[in-house]
Structures are given as structure tokens and as C-alpha cells.
Amino acid sequence: MRLHSILTLILILVCCSFAQASLTVSLQPETSVRGSEILLGDIASVTGSDQEIERAQQISLGAAPLAGTTRSVRRNQIEWRLAENRLKDFVVTGPAIVTIARATRSLGGSELAKVAKDALREAWGDLGSQLEIVPVTPEPTISVPEGDIEISARPTGAQIGSMRAVLLTITVDGNAIRQLTLRYRLHLETDVAATTCSLSPRDAITPANWSVQCCDIAGLSGRPLKPSEIEGSRMKRAVSAGTVLTTDNTEPIPLVVRRGRVLVIVRVGAITLTCEGVALQDGAAGDTIQVRNPSTNQTFQARVTDTGTAEITY
């Protein structure tokens, strides 16, 4: 009889506390959140007056756990935060500890690969649509927190042959949360200017030693030359037949060529003299080069002014 009376009294007190509370916060043992911050409204059901509900729901309980992990919040922590925010007439029901996980979603390999391949095609400009892209590394499926997800990509590092790496950055709600690198092998055949025979360094490129051929240009280290750009160019290094002519393996023929004859104009005030010399180095317009006098073997400096011409002014 006495035990029954005690239980009845406890029930009456509990009912009275509910009746007097203007705000009720109901907890569940486990829940998940989407954002980077845990708000009370994300993990609990809040009832009461509209104004107090809004205040209570916006109470921060700290940072959300990382994707794939959990965090625990104790009921007394929630009660303390409610009191700290000047919410006095409240009751918190439910478990003593709430386990909170970060809501996640999967990004499939195909979704990541599309962004990476689009970045490679964009880097190739007009030829991007013809680019064949073959994955070298697996295209993984990864888990990221739910939210406003953006995936950005840019080619990164030096190209090694036809191999190219793409750096992906995954952003959730404006925060970069993960980076990963995918690698691809590129292949692109198109008509370009290529050599028809072996050429040595400094050999002039003429219609007799190049033609338009279908070649794979994906592994080139320089931009293929257009036919209109070839005239007046020479090779920087030795190449074999079938080599694509690019900005990397060619250079403009200088106005003055090493070991070539050069007309030297000497100006002393109003007096102008000319003599012939031998250039000891290549020179473009405005370059100062070493020139040797073939008669005396003496060397002097002269400034390149035109094709086969250099000038000395005193």
C-alpha cells in the first residue's frame, strides 16, 4: 500500500511537471544531421509556443561528426544549453545519451569521372570532343556528408607522355572536405604537320621535309604547329621521320645564324663603314652577338639589325 502511494505521488509530480513546462524536448537514442553543426532542432522534436520552439531549435550543440563517424550528446548537456539560452520552463525526455551520425551520400565513380574528363576536354579546347580518355587508376565510389555538393576538377602536374592526372576537389556547403587524384591515358589522332625524313638540330624546315599526316598528338609536350606557322622555322633537336612539328621542337630561324656570314655596319658619327664577318652565335633582332673578323681573327660585339646584318655604333 505504501509503495503504491509513492508511485502515485511520483506520477502526479511528473504529470505536474509536464503540465507546467511550456517547452518539451523529446530525444531519440540515435539520429543523424546534414550540416556541419548540430542544432537542437535537428536531433529532437520540440513542442511548445512558436517563439520558444524557434529559439530552442536554433541552439547549437557543437560541430557535427565527420562522415562515417558518430558523436554523443548527453541529455544534461542539452538541459544546460536550454537554460543558458534563458529557456526556463522546459522538460527534456528520452535517453540520457543521444548518438549522432553525419548523414552521408555516395558519389559514384562515374559521377567523379565525368567531371574529371570534362576538365581534360576543356583543356584541349576545340579538339577536346575528339579526345579518347582511358582511366589508368580506378574511379572510386566515395562517401561524403550530405549538403550542397560541388565537384571541381583541374589537370595537375606535368604530363608524362600521354598520361595526365586530374585533381578533384569536393566541396560540401562551401567547405572543401576531400581531394583525390585520378589518372588517365589520352589518345587523339588528327591531321598535323609532321616530318617526312630525319632532321638534325638547326635544319631549316622546308616543304621538302614535312607534310600533313594523321598522328596521335595526345602525348606531345608542345602545341602542334599550323602549316601557316612553319615557314621560317628550324629544328631545335634531332628528330626522326613522322615527328609532329610543335612549339617545343622547333624555333624561328634567327636573323643571324652561327658560323654564317654577316654584314657588319660600323657607324662613327657621320661616317659609315662596312665589313664582312662570321657570326659566332645565333642572333635575333636586337641581340648583341660575337662576330669574328676572318681577315684578322679578332672578335668584336655587334647588334643584330636585319637578316645577315649587324651594326656597331661609336
Image (tube, rainbow, N blue to C red):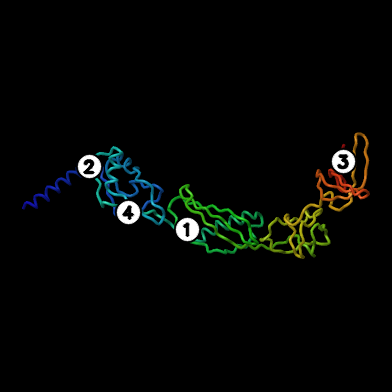
Across and down, in percent, residue 89 comes to 24, 40
Tag 2 residue: 21
Indicate the secondary structure of the residue bearing disc 2. loop
Q: Are marks 3 and 1 in contact (CB under 8 Å)?
A: no
Element at label 1: strand
Residue 99, disc: 4
State the residue in front, 220 or 150: 220
Q: Position of residue 138 (x, y in %)?
A: 53, 64
Question: For the residue carrying disc 3, how many other residues have a C-alpha within 10 Å: few (<14), some (14-19), or many (20+)?
Answer: some
Q: What distance separates the C-alpha of mark 2 from that of mark 3?
A: 101 Å
Amino acid bearing label 1: Leu
* Mark 2 vs mark 4, CA separation in Å: 25 Å
Q: CA distance from mark 1 to mark 2?
A: 45 Å
Distance between mark 4 and mark 1 Cα atoms? 25 Å
Camera-side mark, 4 or 1: 4
Q: Residue at coordinates 36% horizontally, 46% vertically from top-left?
A: 62
Q: Which mark is residue 256?
A: none
Q: Say left or right for 187 vs 56.
A: right
Q: Which residue is mark 3?
A: 312
Name the N-terminal-most of marks 3 and 1: 1
Circles 4 and 1, Cβ within 8 Å, touching? The answer is no
Cα separation between marks 3 and 1: 69 Å
Q: Secondary structure at mark 4?
A: strand
